[in-house]
Amino acid sequence: MGSRRATSQRSSTRRAPGPRGAKWRDAAIRGHVSRGTGILNNTTYIGCVVWNRRQYRKNPETERRVARGNKESEWVVNDDHHALRIVDDALWARVKERQQEVGKVFSYTTTNRLNGAHRPS
């Protein structure tokens, strides 16, 4: 966990622009596993490009974009493992295993969603 934070801090000190021109944060690297966001969940690195995963609509009250997930049957998937792959299957599998381990550690409570942010004793 500290390595993602350190990576984001190194990227910021090198003045490499982060997503949308902002500073790098560890969430940009970690992302959200079930949504497939973040660098560690980007299937492009294993040669699988997915289009039409989400649609964006503007909320008329807040004027903000809201992402809505499309059904998996509507996704357009291009598997070109030979031309696009930059991460091998073994490394991808290790990352996914580690994400599951970390997810188990932080899923110890279901009573209050805010408790998920606290580390267990």
Image (cartoon, rainbow, N blue to C red):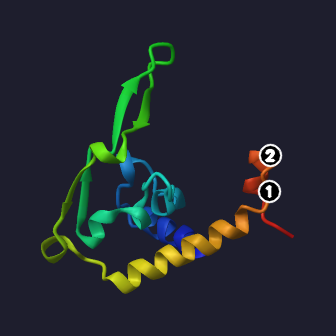
Q: Residues within 10 Å of mark 1 (few under 14, many from 20)?
A: few
In the picture shown, does residue 47 fall above or below 15?
below
In the picture shown, does residue 93 fall above or below 111?
below
Residue 63 image offset from top left, x and y in percent = 44, 19
Residue drawn at x 26%, y 54% as measured from the top left: 50
**Label number found at residue 2:** none
- Return the residue nearer the eye: 69 or 30: 69
Q: Are marks 2 and 1 in contact (CB under 8 Å)?
A: yes
Q: Residue furthest left?
A: 83
In the figure, is residue 115 to the left or right of 17? right
Q: Secondary structure at mark 1?
A: loop
Residue 50 visible in the picture: yes
Q: Secondary structure at mark 2?
A: loop
Q: Residue furthest front?
A: 73
Residue drawn at x 63%, y 75% as measured from the top left: 101
Residue drawn at x 53%, y 77% as measured from the top left: 97
Quadrant containing the C terminus in the rendered view: bottom right
- Which residue in the protein does label 2 denote? 112
Residue drawn at x 51%, y 66% as measured from the top left: 9
Q: Residue furthest bottom?
A: 90
Quadrant containing the N terminus in the rendered view: bottom right
Residue 81 figure quarter: bottom left
Q: Residues within 10 Å of mark 2 (few under 14, many from 20)?
A: few
Say which amino acid is labelled 2.
Asn
Say which amino acid is labelled 1.
Thr
- Which residue in the protein does label 1 denote? 109
Spatial separation of the CA atoms under disc 2 and disc 1: 7 Å
Q: Residue furthest right?
A: 121
Residue 80 image offset from top left, x and y in percent = 16, 68
In the figure, is residue 42 to the left or right of 99? left
In the figure, is residue 3 to the left or right of 110? left
Residue 1 visible in the picture: no
